[in-house]
Amino acid sequence: MILTHAHLDHCGWIPRLVKEGFKGKIYATPPTIDLCGVILPDSGHLQEEEAKFHNKKGTSKHSPALPLYTLEEAENSLPYFHPVAFGELKTLSDQFSFRFVHAGHILGAAMVEAFLRQNGTSRKFLFTGDIGRVPQVPDSPGRVVHAGPDTGEDPDMLVMESTYGNRTHPHDDVRPELAKLISDTVHRGGSVVVPAFAVERTQKFLFLLKQLMETNQIPRVPVFVDSPMAIKAVDICLKYTGEFNQESRELISTYGSPLEWPGFTFAAKQEDSRKINDVLYPCIIVSSSGMVTGGRVLHHLMHRLPDPKNQVIFIGFQAPGTRGAIIKSGAKSVRIFSQEVYIRAHVNALEQFSDHADTAELLRWLKTFKKKPETTFLVHGENEAAGLLQEAMTHELGWKVNIAHWMEKVPLV
Ligand SMILES: [Zn+2]
């Protein structure tokens, strides 16, 4: 198995595969392996919690409801991971070798260049995984990891993501808008809740908060980072500072580890988390899960959403159907722990934080290709996004572009 990066929609099934008997090697970059070491056990833990909850409440159609895998089963899958560094050519057989190149998406995220040889012919296949922001200049705001995806590709066949094939992200600096939202909230006596993916996204956000405080752009209110995973992820982010862009590297070297910043509290235990509910003065709570599908952020939103003084700021993608998408849509209430919770707090979303290239960025990256792939397949996008990207690529680049169908098989050689 070749894994592009540590987001759960890419790695989340691995413990289940191992549970069902997968015994092969799982190749990934060293940062991806470190991140999976935190994310997968946590995912198992959440699975167990959810099953327990449904069994107690009788709210599942399964009896008993079972986790897809447990924390322990997730840990059992970790020995199958094998590190492959960026740029290293890994030969698996005479017919197949591959190399990881930077995808610029999140820490450790890679695209896979696969080289296939058969009967004297050699073909190059590029699987993009998720593609990060493509900067116009290397340090565009919103771009944190590496300087965008590696350029100058020349695959014969391309499989690429299309998440934002119908979208244009704002390219302006997110800091002034973020500073205003936080300052306004604090001045009306409210608190800010930021649902954020605990690994990577939370750490980037903390450095921004620190910078805004140190430059007096926001008041110095207490910041609570409420996610057991976030603490471990800080160390992983600091271990691989070489992967970040210049600006982020400077922030890290100026401010050091978030775990030591005064005024920033990391809630490791459940009781630390509950205590945050008792905080009546303005504060900032960064908690997961990012799409409000589970995790400790549920308690915080249940507690803070009904008060119009408070503010919710989304800094990540909200998949259709998730609680995050419902709250973001301007709904009047949302169901949390089987209760209808009124949404009177302010709700804003800052799209600059996106880790995915938008349509124009994808096209700009594709234009760096040294040759036209014979075929391109689009994956990882809602129908509308994939359709519009297909149209844009056909129209602007003159490429042959297909949208991959479920269970479709395509010969590579
Ligand atoms: Zn991803």
Image (tube, grey):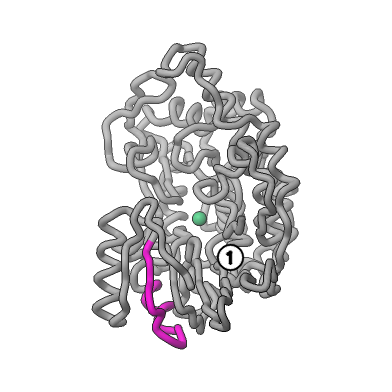
One can see residue 402 in this view = yes
The residue closer to the viewer here, 397 or 131, is 397
Residue 233 percent location from the top left of the image: 67, 48
Residue holding disc 1: 110
Residue plotted at (31% across, 82% down): 397
Residue 64 percent location from the top left of the image: 51, 15
Q: Which quadrant holds the N terminus?
A: bottom right
One can see residue 167 in this view = no
How many marks overall? 1
The residue closer to the viewer here, 341 or 154, is 154
The residue closer to the viewer here, 145 or 158, is 158
* Range drawn in magenta: 361-378
Q: Hey, what amino acid is under mark 1?
A: Ala
Residue 236 percent location from the top left of the image: 71, 54
Query: Could you tell me which secondary element the residue under label 1 belongs to?
Result: strand
Residue plotted at (31% across, 67% down): 402
Residue 307 to residue 367: above or below: above
